[in-house]
Image (cartoon, grey):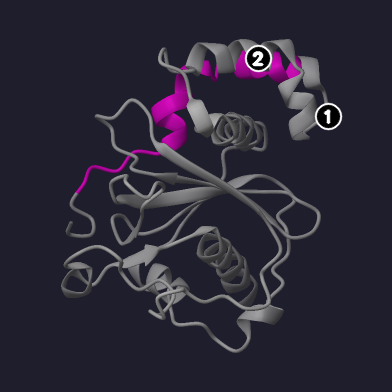
């Protein structure tokens, strides 16, 4: 669990690189300038791609996150595959204890989809109560008008055919706290403190991370 010890691969390249030449252009040809999720889900070329990517054993409760990932990847490709990489210092700055300014934080919605990639193996999350802890690779930050829409990717690894995904959307809540009283972004796995790690314990913390990343860009 040492930060930076794993081989890095972009989640788009891991799952969608093979579709750059024909499948993604076919979706764009049919959608034209439309980019909303409802239009995407009704598009025949997009439905074909999702059918091909869907696991043989189905998706269960993860179907909404799966659709959100494919839609986000399409927008990311269509808008030029822009990625912002945050080093360890900037990643740790996102995980500071709750600041008084956070509830008023706006952060301008991007005009184009992009991917925010944090320092590797530094922020961890558990997407199911009985699931494993997985490192956050980053998230697709998507145009949303108001609020924030993001699709986060966990457990990205070149030897893994897929990844774990959490899609969240909304405005920053007026107050954020953990039920157990521990600080936001404090590690939740055994040994996390000694290893200097951070953790996301729920969707509100994930949204806060996204808003802080936007705010950091505005202030830099």
Q: Which residues are magenta?
A: 6-29
Q: Is residue 163 magenta?
A: no
Please tell me whether residue 15 is drawn above or below residue 216 in the rendered image: above
- CA gap, disc 2 and disc 1: 18 Å
Look at 47% across and 41% down and name the residue there: 165
Q: Which residue is mark 2?
A: 47
Q: Earlier in the sequence, mark 2 or mark 1?
A: 1
Q: Position of residue 101 (x, y in %)?
A: 63, 86
Q: Residue at x 41, y 81 (%)?
A: 181
Q: Quadrant of residue 186?
A: bottom left
Q: Label for residue 105?
A: none
Q: Is residue 17 found inside the magenta-colored segment of the image? A: yes
Q: Is residue 128 above or below residue 35?
A: below
**Residue 22 visible here:** no
The residue shown at (66%, 35%) is 75
Question: Residue at the location (22% across, 74% down)?
Answer: 193
Q: Provide the residue designation for mark 1.
A: 33
Q: Position of residue 177 (x, y in %)?
A: 51, 77
Determine the image quadrant of residue 105.
bottom right
**In the rendered image, is residue 217 in sight?**
yes
| Quadrant, the N terminus | bottom left
Helix, strand or loop status at disc 2: helix
């Amino acid at each position: 669990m040492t930060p930076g010890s794993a081989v890095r691969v972009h989640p788009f390249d891991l799952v969608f690189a093979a579709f750059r030449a024909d499948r993604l252009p076919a979706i764009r040809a049919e959608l034209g300038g439309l980019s909303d999720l409802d239009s995407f889900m009704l598009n025949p070329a997009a439905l074909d791609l999702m059918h091909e990517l869907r696991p043989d054993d189905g998706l269960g409760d993860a179907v909404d996150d799966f659709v959100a990932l494919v839609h986000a990847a399409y927008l990311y490709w269509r808008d030029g595959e822009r990625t912002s990489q945050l080093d360890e210092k900037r990643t740790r700055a996102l995980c500071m204890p709750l600041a008084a300014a956070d509830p008023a934080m706006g952060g301008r919605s991007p005009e184009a989809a992009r991917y925010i990639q944090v320092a590797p193996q530094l922020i961890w999350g558990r997407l199911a109560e009985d699931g494993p802890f997985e490192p956050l690779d980053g998230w697709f930050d998507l145009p949303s008008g108001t609020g924030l829409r993001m699709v986060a990717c966990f457990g990205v690894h070149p030897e893994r055919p897929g990844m774990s995904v959490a899609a969240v959307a909304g405005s920053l809540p007026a107050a954020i706290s953990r039920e157990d009283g521990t600080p936001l972004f404090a590690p939740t796995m055994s040994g996390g403190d000694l290893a200097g790690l951070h953790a996301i314990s729920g969707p509100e913390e994930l949204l806060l991370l996204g808003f802080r990343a936007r705010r950091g860009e505005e202030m830099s």
